Amino acid sequence: MVIHKCNIILEIENLLVVILISFFFSGKIKLFLTSYFVCYLFILFHELAHIVIATIFKKKIRKIKLSIAGVSVAFNNDELEIVKNILIYLAGPVSNICLAIMFYKIDFVFEINIFLAILNFMPVYPLDGYNIAKYIFKYNTLKRIEYTFLSLLFLISILVLIIKFNPSLLIFFIYIMLIKYVTKNRGNY
């Protein structure tokens, strides 16, 4: 579903709409999806931090996308100083750290927000860490750093799968690789 309003495109993935509808009509699904939606709120807060800082710097939003994997915001390619661009990308992970500090007594909230901050600081496309690193490193150096982190992420996700029987990090790794593949084939990467 795509909505155009005030020169901003709001794209909502159809599967997300189905999940939202099923959440309200099924007790068993509601129980399962509650933690998913709590995490989704943290991701939404993260993206809102990007929007607030970008708006302060007068950068215009081009597109907001809501999908089952999270929320993403794309801005117009307005030229800004490097420091301002870095601050925009820092805003998301820093907002998760702030939430973790504010709710440090609630283990679930603390752990999820620290995890989101660490994940987003990774210099892997399309995460915030990559967008920060592209202003600091030359392209070839950035690619070496990115592939090193991707290799580490893959190894850690396999270890988590084997030791904890938790596939979530591996699923995240596959999701990142799919985004990279699709973006590269479209010529946007």
Image: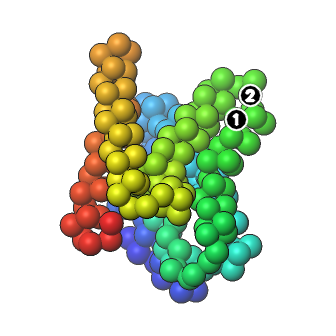
Question: Could you say where residue 85 lies in the image, as x and y percent from the top left?
Answer: 61, 67
Extreme residue toward the left, this view: 185
Is label 2 in contact with label 1 (beta carbons under 8 Å)?
yes
Horizontal side of 28 relative to 170 (left or right) equals right
Question: Could you say where residue 96 lies in the image, as x and y percent from the top left?
Answer: 65, 43
Q: Residue at x 48, y 44 (%)?
A: 122
Question: Could you say where residue 48 lies in the image, as x and y percent from the top left?
Answer: 64, 60
User: Which numbered marker is on residue 115?
Assistant: none
Quadrant housing the C terminus? bottom left
Mark 2: secondary structure: loop
Q: Residue at x 41, y 54 (%)?
A: 142
Q: Is residue 96 above or below residue 109?
A: below
Mark 1: secondary structure: helix
Count of number-bearing discs: 2
User: Which numbered marker is on residue 104?
Assistant: 2
- Residue assigned mark 1: 100
Q: Residue at x 64, y 75 (%)?
A: 81
Frontmost residue, 37 versus 154: 154
Q: Residue at x 54, y 45 (%)?
A: 121
Q: Is residue 59 above or below residue 47?
A: below
Report if residue 88 is visible in the image: no
Which of the 4 image quarters holds residue 61?
A: bottom right
Report if residue 47 is visible in the image: yes
